Amino acid sequence: MGMTITEKIIAAHSGHQEISAGQFVYADVDICLGNDITAPIAIEQFETLGVENVFNPDSIVLVPDHFTPNKDIKSAQNSKLLREFALKHQIKNYFEVGRVGIEHVLLPEQGIVVPGDLVIGADSHTCTYGAMGIFSTGVGSTDLAACYATGKVWLKVPETIKFIFNGKLNEWVSGKDLILHVIGNIGVDGARYKAMEFSGSVITDLSMDDRLAMCNMAIEAGAKNGIIEPDDCTENYVNGRAQREYKFYSSDADCEYHEIHEYDVSTLSPQVAIPNLPENVRPVEELSDIAIDQVVIGSCTNGRISDLRIAAQILKDKKIHPSIRLIVIPGTQAVYLEALKEGLIEVFIKAEGVVSTPTCGPCLGGHMGILAEGERALSTTNRNFAGRMGHPKSEVYLSNPAVAAASAITGKITHPEKIN
Amino acid sequence: MINGKSWKYGDNVNTDEIIPARYLNTTNEKELAAHCMEDIDPEFVNKAVEGDIIVAGDNFGCGSSREHAPISIKALGISCVIAKSFARIFFRNAINIGLPIFESEKAGIEISDGDNVKVDINSNIITNLTTNKEYSFTPFADEMKDIIKAGGLMEYIKVNYCSS
Ligand code: SF4
């Protein structure tokens, strides 16, 4: 029996020739990631072990991105803990404010994670890197602490669900819409404990930014990981960035899938998830009367340069609706700088939006754009749970950056084709 | 043996509801416990008493990887969580920190708010003492049992990796 790409990568990292779904392994970890919310607990846990050194400082990545630049004293204390731990253990992949970006935009961009890796992160959206042919999954702080000491993680090999996308995408339809469509179809626990493998001609034609946005939201279907077989697009992306040697894995023709879903997406329009679950997905046309207070363009889902480009294309020479607050957050300093060079930042400011330094900020209701009671946001982020962006009685709708930009202009949820 | 009163919730209880992000600037267990379940049930911390049990539907603990969620539940003194199913990161976090969790489709459906519930870990049986009904729960993989027996992942690591 052949193996899936997910099974192959786990096998290669746990000393097995062959592996199958359901098997329990302790796997070697190439990169383990923590942030300013999750790493403090991991560091405290690690320090209870009484071990002098971390297993391998080069495998540890610390990204203070959630509440930074520190929003209050407690956050500053947590960031300080990361800084001191990085210094003590000579962790080179620690990103101080000024070099930091949102972790799941930063790690692929900097070539810190490379195809064929096994990556864990104490952040649920660690599944993002599957877009590059990596097995990567979210874990908790204690897992991270254990990995600091041992270089390993316990895993149950997941079954894989395959998703095949056929047809040709309409204008204004992106990777974000594909993944929202899938979550709307299978539900927020439709892939619980499973691997989601995305394939088909539509995926072959998709940019890496869009692939990253898709795998990013695998967790929103409950999945352990999302993954795409590496191809020319992957090679073009990693070539010149990869900090280590990389390896392309692919699924065998005779591997076993738990389920296969096939979609023709030629008629798909931009998708919007309405409160309070990412599975509540509607085509944008059905929501055109919904007024909003705030638009957020950014996050580990859609804070990459192509996302800002498409938003700027729509907002160019326009002003946002008087009742709207537009917040644009480039994912990393490199994205920010590129957007600056291309004149995109000027477009956002002239449109009367604000541009923030890279941070998770409002995505998790942290800072930089919290909602008041009864307010409604349209956001390019990934979660629309009740109160996610602020007051428990505020609402979040999720969309792609084009819909977000168009809606900022009209003040209501709007199909980008309506903006001339 | 676990024995306590149940507090019943629905499907897809997410980690933002269990411990909202506005409290994630601390790792202090007592502070986290003081806000446990705040965005789904603001009264929870006042009415739950030590030893009580949370019972829920599908996908309990979905959303973020924040270990602050199971920590806040454990630190409040909740003795275990019974659900139809758990989101996977919450599941592994609970195992890793030693918060007992039990996956039981029927118990998740049939146990009501306020029922008196007993869990016998050795015999894999949940008993609803209020209705006198018994349920089985999904047994853990042997390797997970080793972590649970050790008292959590850190204790397991201490014995198996850090002893030399
Ligand atoms: S941008 Fe949002 S979803 Fe992504 S890592 Fe930050 S808080 Fe999490």
Image: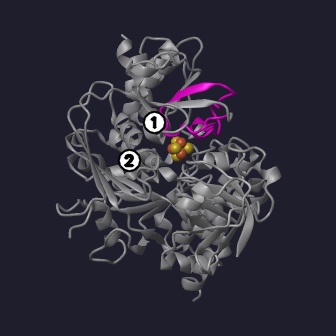
Residue A343 visible at all = no
Q: Is mark 1 within 8 Å of ligand 1?
A: yes
Give coordinates of residue B145: x percent, y percent: 55, 78
As drawn, the label of residue A180 is none
Q: Residues within 10 Å of mark 2 (few under 14, many from 20)?
A: many
Q: Earlier in the sequence, mark 1 or mark 2?
A: 2
Q: What is the quadrant of residue A208 in the picture?
A: top left
**Residue A206 as seen in the image, left or right of residue B98:** left
Give coordinates of residue A293: x percent, y percent: 59, 21
Q: Are callouts 1 and 2 both on one chain?
A: yes
C-alpha distance separating marks 1 and 2: 14 Å
Give coordinates of residue A209: x percent, y percent: 35, 40
Q: Which residue is mark 2?
A: A215
Q: Which residue is mark 1?
A: A303
Q: Secondary structure beneath disc 1?
A: loop
**What's the magenta region?**
A362-390
Q: Chain of mark 2?
A: A
Q: What is the quadrant of residue B50 in the picture?
A: bottom right
Up-down relation of residue B122 to residue A44 (above or below)? below
